Image (spheres, rainbow, N blue to C red):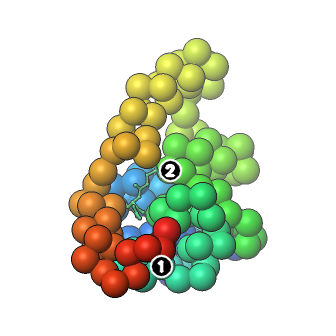
Amino acid sequence: MAGGESDGSGLVLLDVFGSPFAQRVRIALAEKGLAYERAEQDLAAKGDLLRRSNPVHGKVPVLLHAGRPVCESLAVLQYLDEAFPGTPPLLPADPYARGSGRSTRTGSTSAGSACGCGATAAARRLRSPRRGRRW
Ligand SMILES: N[C@@H](CCC(=O)N[C@@H](CS)C(=O)NCC(=O)O)C(=O)O
């Protein structure tokens, strides 16, 4: 168990230790004081849970809430604000501030961006005999 102490029962974070996107969600969960379980993933050999939870991109982080997956770190932040309204807000209340802030951050989290984890996974895939697979 990691994170906070309060009412986040049923929260499981599929992540990788070095992922900055997962780190964003870990910080958000800590800010909100929500308890969660970490489920470390192997990006070089993605497991069924990650594939099922994020069938489009197969990336971390994925937050499971009562077994239901929310993918994409910024979407997870918004989800946490909406699903746990009694906790400190992560995003501004003003729709314009929220929207413009999100648009400036989306560039750094889009599919084209790479972090160390993604690059490593992609490089391993290229070297792997299973490289024909999408995962
Ligand atoms: N836009 C995504 C980016 C997530 C991302 O790139 N995750 C990397 C780890 S840092 C990943 O899972 N890479 C696996 C892969 O590319 O196959 C977000 O904000 O959550």
x then y, percent, for residue 49 = 61, 79
For disc 1, the neighbor class at 10 Å (few under 14, some 14 to 19, many from 20) is: some
What is the three-letter code of the residue carrying label 2? Ser
Residue 70 appears in which quarter of the rendering? bottom right
- Vertical placement of residue 121 versus 116, above or below: below
Asked if residue 57 can be seen in this view, the reply is yes
Given this view, does label 1 or label 2 mark the residue nearer the observer? 1
- Name which of mark 1 and mark 2 comes first in the sequence: 1
Residue placed under numbered mark 1 in the picture: 46
- Label count reads 2
Residue drawn at (47%, 63%) of the image: 60
Residue placed under numbered mark 2 in the picture: 73
Residue drawn at (40%, 82%) of the image: 130
In what quadrant does ligand 1 lie?
bottom left
Residue 6 appears in which quarter of the rendering? bottom right
Residue 124 appears in which quarter of the rendering? bottom left
Classify mark 1 as within 8 Å of ligand 1 or not, answering yes or no.
yes
Classify mark 2 as within 8 Å of ligand 1 or not, answering yes or no.
yes
Residue 42 located left or right of residue 92: left
- Vertical placement of residue 13 versus 39, above or below: above
Assign a secondary structure to mark 1: loop
Residue 117 located left or right of residue 13: left
x then y, percent, for residue 63 = 59, 63
x then y, percent, for residue 31 = 48, 52
Instruction: Estimate the spatial distance between the alpha carbons at disc 1 and disc 2, rounded to whole Å.
Output: 19 Å
Residue nearest the viewer, comparing 72 with 85: 72
What is the three-letter code of the residue carrying label 1? Lys
